[in-house]
Image (tube, rainbow, N blue to C red):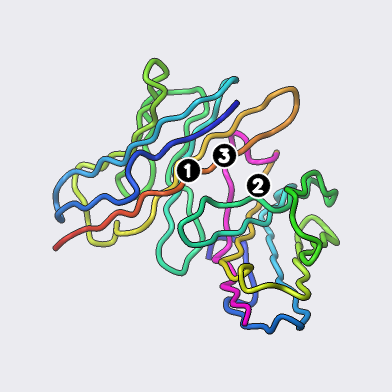
Amino acid sequence: ETGVTQTPRHLVMGMTNKKSLKCEQHLGHNAMYWYKQSAKKPLELMFVYNFKEQTENNSVPSRFSPECPNSSHLFLHLHTLQPEDSALYLCASSQEDGVGYGYTFGSGTRLTVV
Amino acid sequence: AQSVTQLDSHVSVSEGTPVLLRCNYSSSYSPSLFWYVQHPNKGLQLLLKYTSAATLVKGINGFEAEFKKSETSFHLTKPSAHMSDAAEYFCVVTGNSGGYQKVTFGTGTKLQVIP
């Protein structure tokens, strides 16, 4: 384990469902991130939180809704997703925004939208 | 502007032979550079990082990379490949411009190790 835990590991959901992805870190990091990894595409940064405040929303559709209740937990709430949203969703954390420090990634949630 | 280019999408080597994964970057500011490895169905793991100290950086599992400013390169090498090195490798550049942190991932290089 890396210190960043993501649950669930796999999720299959219909387009009308509502589900949430969870990420938890106890590394004392102050920044957390959601990334989307699709086949044959570069990693896409979705959201950045620093000290629980959202500092970046990379033009993500509103059907993805992040929540960061404290610096150790990050959620991604999903509703009315599309099949093209199927991907590996990676959570990461870092100290001081990751510049010069590097990220610690979770193992990801493999999401399939049917 | 900031970008990173991984020149090979796939690299295939025989077990016991050297590994070279190429990465070139461009950055308007003093960058930090990283290599991450991703094994199947896993998250990304930090292999090594360059943050303006020694230009030759040693990482985990016998990997190392050399920062060459004149060539804007940060190639990843290993003297002898193991079967367990088969994975996807990502080069990452980060920079600080006017207080804004920007992180750019490469598109990845899949390393195949042939027995």
Residue A105 magenta? yes
The x, y position of residue A50, in whole percent, is 78, 46
The x, y position of residue A112, in whole percent, is 59, 77
Mark nearer the viewer, 3 or 2: 3
Between the C-alphas of marks 3 and 2, the distance is 15 Å
Provide the residue span drawn in magenta: A97-114
Between the C-alphas of marks 3 and 1, the distance is 7 Å
Report in which chain the residue with disc 2 lies.
Answer: A
Q: Is residue A113 left or right of residue B19?
A: right
- Quadrant of the rendering where the N terminus of chain B is positioned: top right
Q: Residue at x 57, y 67 (%)?
A: A87
Q: Nearer the viewer, residue A91 or A46?
A: A46
Up the image or down, A48 lies above or below A89; here it is: above
Up the image or down, B82 lies above or below B78; here it is: below
Counting every numbered tag in the picture gives 3
Say which residue label 2 marks: A94
Amino acid type shown at disc 1: Gly
Looking at the rendered structure, which numbered label has been put on residue B106? 1
Badge 3 and badge 2 both on one subunit = no
Give the secondary structure at mark 1. loop
Q: Is residue A91 left or right of residue A62?
A: left
Q: Residue at x 59, y 47 (%)?
A: A103
Q: Residue at x 62, y 74 (%)?
A: A83
Mark nearer the viewer, 2 or 1: 1
The x, y position of residue A55, in whole percent, is 80, 44
Give the secondary structure at mark 3. strand
Between the C-alphas of marks 2 and 1, the distance is 19 Å
Looking at the rendered structure, which numbered label has been put on residue B104? 3
Dot 3 crowding, Cα within 10 Å, few <14, some 14–19, many 20+: many
Tags 3 and 1 touching, CB below 8 Å: yes
